[in-house]
Amino acid sequence: MLWIPYALAASFTITAFGQANAHFKLPGPLLNIYRGATPVLMMLPFAPLIDFPTAWQFYALTAVNGFIVSFSDARIFDATAKFGNGQVQRLLPLVLILVFFVWLPLDMDHTAKLLAHPLLTAGIIAALIIAWVSLFFMTRTRITLDALYYVLPVIFATALIDPVNKLTTRYSHGLSGAASYTLFVSLWVFVFMLPRLAIGRIQASNMLSLRTAGYGTIIGVFVIASSLTKNHAMSYAPNPAFVSAIIFCAGIWATIYARVRGLPDEHNVPAAIVFIFSTIALMLLARMI
């Protein structure tokens, strides 16, 4: 059950990341440049202390996730700007169900345990579905077909990120493994974003301004914190979907933050309560695997 506190910590840091960018309002591609570059620059001085993995598969998998993140994050940021945060937040939880099923063929031992306990498996799937439905209704924003078509590729792409992250933990261990994952995924995100910079999609003057650099540094701190804690959670969890479910608590923390600050908030409290109970049920059921 070590994955639960790490997943909760990741959800807190991801909430902080989202709240920071809601305040900074950096464009998607520019934010992704800093999301990749600043963690690398911050972590390089500590590289001699990191016991980097020796398996080539680790670096191949981080490259895969770096590519997916460079696409999905930028598109999510653009979708938020185009359709509003509410519509995006209603659609993304579908990832939760997809992650569960994507992982099954990748870990046959885990799948065999689930098949050996059909009632337990049915309970887990029911908890995941209830969590997804409650997340869908947590935001009252009306969904448009344009938003659905725009976000759908992101949903399928994002459903691969957590299983790939979980796979990397087979080739890395402990804090050094989590630090290596954070460093190399960030590096690959930066590399895959460079073509946008080269073709002028990102203005160099905007990227190098003191104000933007300050924002980017703060974003980098949150990326490091969320990646380290999430990677630890992935290494202990039997299925990455369990970690994903806890991370979606970010919506709960954002609501609490808004209520405490007296900021406008459109979240549906009854749906949030149902989500909390479904995640508690999921944690209890996951202990039995």
Image: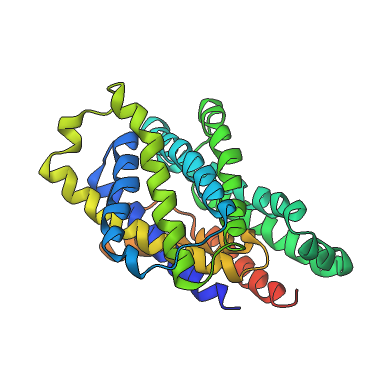
> Which of 71/259 is in front?
71
Q: Is residue 58 above or below residue 72?
A: below
Residue 79: horizontal and vertical position, in percent? Answer: 43, 33
Q: Residue extending furthest top?
A: 199
> Which of 151/271 is in front?
151
Q: Is residue 71 above or below residue 113?
A: above
Q: Residue extending furthest left?
A: 210
At 74% from the left edge and 60% from the top edge, which residue is drawn?
126
In this image, 231 relative to 15: left or right? right
- Colour treatment of the image: rainbow
User: In which image quadrant can residue 128 be found?
Assistant: bottom right
At 36% from the left edge and 27% from the top edge, which residue is drawn?
195
Q: Is residue 61 above or below residue 6?
A: above
Residue 285: horizontal and vertical position, in percent? Answer: 71, 73
In this image, 46 relative to 146: left or right? left
Q: Quadrant of the C terminus?
A: bottom right
Q: Quadrant of the N terminus?
A: bottom right
> Which of 50/288 is in front?
50
One can see residue 255 in this view: no
